[in-house]
Image: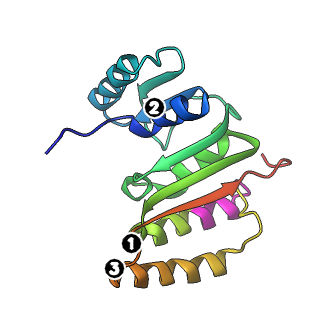
């Protein structure tokens, strides 16, 4: 079994789209390992990693154009705080994506509901009742072996906090 490729998604985004990426991991050793991989990929200056807590992000308000949370939201003890932090760090009009295995999607939907109630995000062209229904259908598809991963995307309102 090969070791985990810490920061692989951040490195991929920077390489494929030419964007600047800041990755956060709760573990300092994970962040350091990801930094080494980014340097080895020749992306120093475009990709940076730091240790941090998703419930208290070390960034100012409206700092990012986009935020992704990959396979982690279900691990956060205080999901409403983490959702509020993602919304706070995102500029108005920015996009947030939560990606994970489908069996944990219901927890993400709960986080989206909390953030929506706080005025932090909106689901463009969708509603939470329909999203919950789709989540249940996705869980059935996972149980049947035809689906295993999902990405939920939301946009912060331009006039939002």
Residue at figure coordinates x 59%, y 26% from the top left: 20
Q: Residue 117 colored magenta?
A: yes
Q: Which marked residue is nearer to the observer: mark 1 or mark 2? A: 2
| 78 to 40, vertically: above or below | below
> From which residue to which does the magenta span run?
112-120
Task: Tell me if label 3 and label 1 are in contact, CB under 8 Å.
Answer: no
Q: Is residue 40 left or right of residue 125?
A: left
Q: Which is closer to the viewer, label 3 or label 1?
A: 3
- Tell me the tag on residue 103: 1
Placement of the N terminus among the 4 image quadrants: top left
Residue at 71% x, 35% y is: 62
Image point 37% across, 22% down: which residue?
35
Q: Are marks 2 and 3 in contact (CB under 8 Å)?
A: no
Of mark 1 and mark 2, the one earlier in the sequence is 2
Pointer 2: what residue? 11
Q: Quadrant of residue 92?
A: top right
- Where is residue 52? Give x, y as percent: 43, 32
The answer to which of 154 and 45 lies nearer the viewer is 45
Q: Quadrant of residue 115?
A: bottom right
Task: Say which element carries label 3.
Answer: loop
């Amino acid at each position: 079994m090969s070791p985990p490729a810490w920061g692989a998604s951040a490195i991929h985004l920077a390489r494929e789209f030419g964007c600047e990426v800041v990755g956060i991991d709760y573990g300092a050793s994970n962040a350091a390992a990801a930094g080494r991989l980014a340097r080895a990929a020749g992306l120093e200056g475009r990709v940076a990693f730091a240790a941090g807590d998703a419930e208290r992000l070390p960034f100012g308000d409206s700092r990012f154009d986009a935020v992704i949370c990959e396979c982690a939201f279900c691990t956060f003890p205080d999901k409403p705080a983490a959702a509020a932090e993602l919304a706070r760090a995102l500029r108005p009009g920015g996009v947030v994506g939560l990606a994970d295995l489908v069996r944990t999607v219901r927890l993400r939907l709960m986080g989206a509901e909390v953030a929506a109630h706080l005025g932090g995000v909106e689901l463009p062209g969708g509603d939470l009742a329909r999203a919950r229904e789709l989540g249940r259908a996705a869980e059935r598809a996972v149980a049947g072996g035809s689906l295993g991963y999902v990405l939920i995307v939301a946009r912060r309102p331009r006039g939002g906090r």
